[in-house]
Image (cartoon, rainbow, N blue to C red):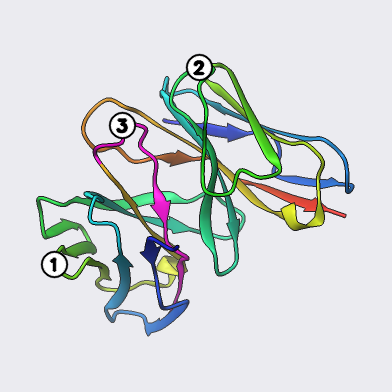
Amino acid sequence: DVKVTQSSRYLVKRTGEKVFLECVQDMDHENMFWYRQDPGLGLRLIYFSYDVKMKEKGDIPEGYSVSREKKERFSLILESASTNQTSMYLCASSSTLGVNTEAFFGQGTRLTVV
Amino acid sequence: DQQVKQNSPSLSVQEGRISILNCDYTNSMFDYFLWYKKYPAEGPTFLISISSIKDKNEDGRFTVFLNKSAKHLSLHIVPSQPGDSAVYFCAASGVSSNTGKLIFGQGTTLQVKP
């Protein structure tokens, strides 16, 4: 059974704090992604990584950074949390094997910045 | 610029009837399309996909139709069941990108009434 695990279901942080969101996958996938979900805006891509130590900006990278030191782990970092980063954060992974493959998602982290 | 659009934020249908969810895209380089289902406080789960070489793909109660000339796809659920009540996201990717990056629509909330 494939699994993407996010370290926290719910987080409350203060404005200005540095926040780490962790994601681990056990499927040996090359690709990993961080999205945020907001009402009316769908899922928007923050960053993705297609290999260890490789990363690319998505559509909304401002205020975020990422780290991928090991293939199975992809971390999202909010350098200085702000209230407009209150959102549902979703991690996903996918394989590069085959022509078309779906992405598998974690359960999500509901982050509230106060 | 929203490359994948779901113009109906919500849809309500009676149990047993057909649910039709629509999605439009603007990027002609997209050649793989997916539908995800999301319950509150959970991550999205993959439902069904279609490659651009096909115009229909069926899996049990779920059928996806692709009209490339119109850059439009739809998801049909027949018969609809109360457990189908969720948010449905349409997503697209291009085979030229081996990173598996998915672009999502805004989502449509489906309510199936008993």
Mark 1 or mark 3: name the one nearer the start of the chain: 1
Query: Magenta span covers which residues?
Result: B95-114
Image quarter of residue B35: bottom left
Label 1 sits on residue: B69
User: Residue A2: x, y in percent?
Assistant: 43, 31
Q: Chain of mark 3?
A: B
- Based on the picture, tell me whether residue B109 belongs to the magenta stretch: yes
Label 2 sits on residue: A52
Q: Amino acid at mark 1?
A: Ser
Q: Is residue B114 visible?
A: no
Q: Quick one: A56 or B90, which is closer to the camera?
A: A56
Q: Are marks 1 and 3 in contact (CB under 8 Å)?
A: no
Q: Where A68 falls versus B92 (above or below)?
A: above
User: Residue A23: x, y in percent?
Assistant: 60, 31
Q: Amino acid at mark 3?
A: Asn
Q: Quick one: B47 or B82, which is closer to the camera?
A: B47
User: Residue A112: x, y in percent?
Assistant: 79, 53
Residue at left offset 81%, top offset 45%: A81
Q: Chain of mark 1?
A: B
User: Residue A17: x, y in percent?
Assistant: 87, 39
Q: Are marks 1 and 2 on the same chain?
A: no
Label 3 sits on residue: B98
